């Protein structure tokens, strides 16, 4: 497919307090595995991805106890206080010319199909890209007090998803060039702030990020449906 190696990066150093649990949300059980195991599995199982670098918190005492931690593709690095710090820590142990696919630890419903779709696009076009889903709901912008300010035109609006795929050295340079790192909300935003193009690859809208307690139930439904299809 390409001479560049493909390496996945899993950002897993976050606390995730909004779910309301007493452990980081990526370690909550979802069906038969933890959220992070569901998020990592498709990358570990992908034949073209040679390594999966997982960025965890310094005081993380959960990941090493998981079965997936023993997989030879897994490499652990110590993350930072912010997501961008954790991603950068992982990028530093990857060869500059490799392609990296950065994925959230709390996105357990990513499919092999969407991963392939992203890889094929980036490799065919030699251009950075992200998975994204089109906005279908009516969008509102509010004042700080919660009152609606205006309805936002939804044409050409997308939900940014992960993984997001770029050449490693390009992504590192973009992150380091941003004067205000707190403005980096995802990898694409760092690339954008440096004036470089980022392309959108339409992915499945069920590639949700577990943020609230109700997201666990929705994710369980999606995964159950997916597992049922695989058995048919």
Image (cartoon, rainbow, N blue to C red):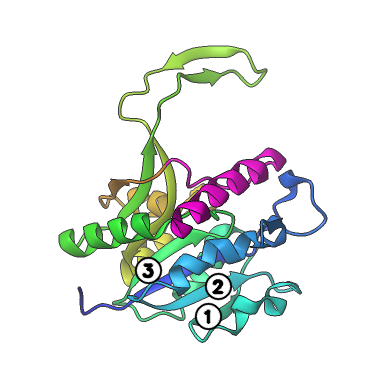
Q: Residues under labels 1 and 2: Cα distance?
A: 7 Å
- Could you tell me which quadrant the C terminus lies in? bottom left
Give residue 105's position: percent from left, percent from top. 57, 60
Q: Is residue 76 visible?
A: yes
158 displayed left or right of 55: left
In front: label 1 or label 2: 1
Magenta span includes 220: yes
Which numbered marker is on residue 100? 3
35 displayed left or right of 169: right
Dot 1: what SS? strand
Residue under numbered circle 1: 74
Give residue 230's position: percent from left, percent from top. 45, 58
Q: Residue at x 50, y 47 (%)?
A: 183
Residue under numbered circle 2: 54
Of 177 and 214, the residue lying toward us? 214
Looking at the rendering, the stretch of residues picked out in magenta corresponds to 205-232
Dot 3: what SS? strand
Q: Residues within 10 Å of mark 1 (few under 14, many from 20)?
A: some
Give residue 17's position: percent from left, percent from top. 74, 49
Q: Residue at x 51, y 20 (%)?
A: 141
Say which label, 2 or 3, has the lower sequence index.
2
């Amino acid at each position: 497919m390409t001479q560049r190696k493909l390496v996945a990066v899993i950002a897993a150093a976050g606390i995730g307090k909004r779910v309301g649990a007493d452990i980081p949300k990526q370690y909550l059980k979802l069906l038969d595995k933890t959220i992070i195991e569901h998020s990592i599995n498709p990358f570990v199982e992908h034949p073209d991805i040679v390594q999966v670098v997982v960025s965890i918190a310094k005081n993380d005492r959960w990941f090493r106890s998981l079965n997936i931690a023993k997989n030879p593709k897994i490499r652990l690095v110590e993350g930072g206080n912010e997501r961008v710090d954790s991603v950068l820590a992982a990028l530093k142990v990857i060869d500059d010319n490799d392609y990296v696919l950065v994925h959230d630890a709390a996105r357990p419903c990513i499919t092999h199909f969407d991963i392939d779709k992203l890889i094929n696009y980036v490799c065919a076009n030699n251009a950075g890209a992200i998975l994204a889903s089109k906005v279908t709901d009516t969008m509102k912008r509010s004042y700080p007090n919660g009152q609606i300010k205006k309805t936002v035109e939804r044409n050409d609006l997308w939900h940014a998803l992960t993984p997001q795929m770029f050449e490693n050295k390009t992504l590192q340079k973009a992150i380091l060039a941003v004067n205000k790192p707190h403005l980096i909300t995802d990898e694409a935003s760092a690339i954008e702030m440096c004036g470089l193009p980022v392309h959108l690859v339409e992915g499945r809208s069920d590639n949700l990020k577990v943020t609230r307690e109700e997201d666990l139930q929705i994710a369980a439904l999606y995964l159950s449906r997916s597992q049922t299809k695989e058995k048919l």
